[in-house]
Amino acid sequence: MDEFLPTVALLRARYHRPAGFNLFSVLRSSSDEVRLHSRFLAFLLAPNAAHNQGTALLDLLLKRLGIQDFDSENAIVEVEYQNIDILVRNPSGQAVIIENKIYASDQDEQLWRYHLRMQAEGYRKIWTTYLTLDGAEPSEQSRKSLPVILLSYEAEIIAWLKDCIPLVAREPGVRESVFQYIELLQKLTSSDQGEIYMSKLKEQILHGENLFLIADINHAFKSVLADLQFDIWERMTACQASQYPHLGKPEITATKEAISAYYKKTKNSKFIGIHFPFNFMKGGVYIELNHRLYCGYYCDGEQFPEDRERLLVLSREIAPSTRNSGYLFWKYPKVNVNLNAPSNEDLALLRDPETRESIAVSLINDAHELWQRAQQQFA
């Protein structure tokens, strides 16, 4: 062990290099599901797009998904059709729904509603795919009894993009865009280590007792992540108690046990957090975790439909761009780290106590602002 870690540090310094300029990162947030990822993927999938490959790129992905007998010659590819992230459909009554989840959480019966919507439009054969960074499953309340094809950026999408490169080789603009997009996805999925670096690292892991030490380190790493996350929740509750005691005593589900279960990937361990119920109406504001922290309004629409409708109207006033949405307002904090599979940049932020304090204070301030808006309007 005394020699292993210094050797790994030397290998990293020698062979691992940070990514250079990336146009996608400059133009858009790397986690922008709709305006970056969905649009670029839809461009590659569209048979009539300027990549000049017709149905070839679409066919490659359909094959990888195991979708057969799809009429791709007459396919139309759309982004945000009826709130569906990417929709591939044809006049033969076939449709492929691609729900693109970088960090956002599932909405109530989301996949099920999309399926019913396309059925209502007359589509007889519908494939529903769920695209995430790591191939995670959708929630049961989103899919209900619907069969769903799981798709990950880390595995299937990167592999598909690499298959596309020979086909677009004579289109330099498209080719370079695909290369840069692969680099962006490798960074998002923490798979951007160079082949030489990883090869050398694997050699070291197989020496002596290193393999067993790595298992111990991996366990300790998850424990450290749990400690860092719990520290953020504790800072939130301390900030709220001192700065905004009028919010009342919160309902806390982000306990040490729940956070530990989250990193053990226990079933139904997502969506832990803290809730601040209103004292002037039903519902309240919450801070919650689904890989990333976010805050927003909540209200049970079945039990309290009038109060939920009031909050929905307020949500649309806060974010007019969501006027056609049926979802209550929510937002990410300014410092937005991935607590499930943190990148190197995320880890650098998480280990800094001042940054954890900043994240906690920012989320509590945002929650308080949402509380005040509701109180001013409805109290």
Image: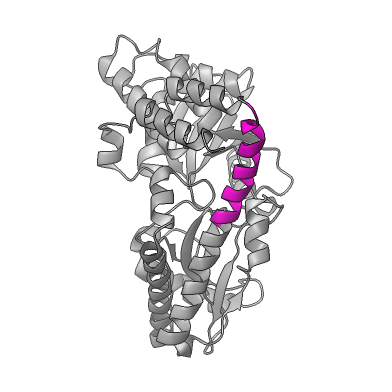
Residue 356, x across and y down, in percent: 42, 64
Between 128 and 134, the residue placed more toward the observer is 134
Farthest-out residue, front: 2
The residue located at (41%, 43%) in the rendering is: 344
Helix, strand or loop: magenta stretch: helix
Q: Quadrant of residue 171?
A: top left
98 relative position to 15: left or right: right
State the scheme by which the image is colored: one colour
Location of residue 339 with respect to 43 vertically, above or below: below
The residue located at (40%, 64%) in the rendering is: 353
> Is the N terminus in the top left, top right, bottom left or bottom right quadrant?
top right
72 relative position to 192: left or right: right
Location of residue 306 with respect to 152 vertically, above or below: below
Q: Quadrant of residue 44?
A: top left
Residue 148 visible in the displayed image: yes
The residue located at (55%, 65%) in the rendering is: 230
Marks counted in the figure total 0
Between 8 and 241, the residue placed more toward the observer is 8
Residue 4, x across and y down, in percent: 52, 33
> Is the C terminus in the top left, top right, bottom left or bottom right quadrant?
bottom left
Between 248 and 12, the residue placed more toward the observer is 12
Q: Which residues are magenta?
A: 208-225
Residue 239, x across and y down, in percent: 43, 79
Location of residue 142 with respect to 192 vertically, above or below: below
Residue 333, x across and y down, in percent: 39, 62
Magenta run includes residue 217: yes
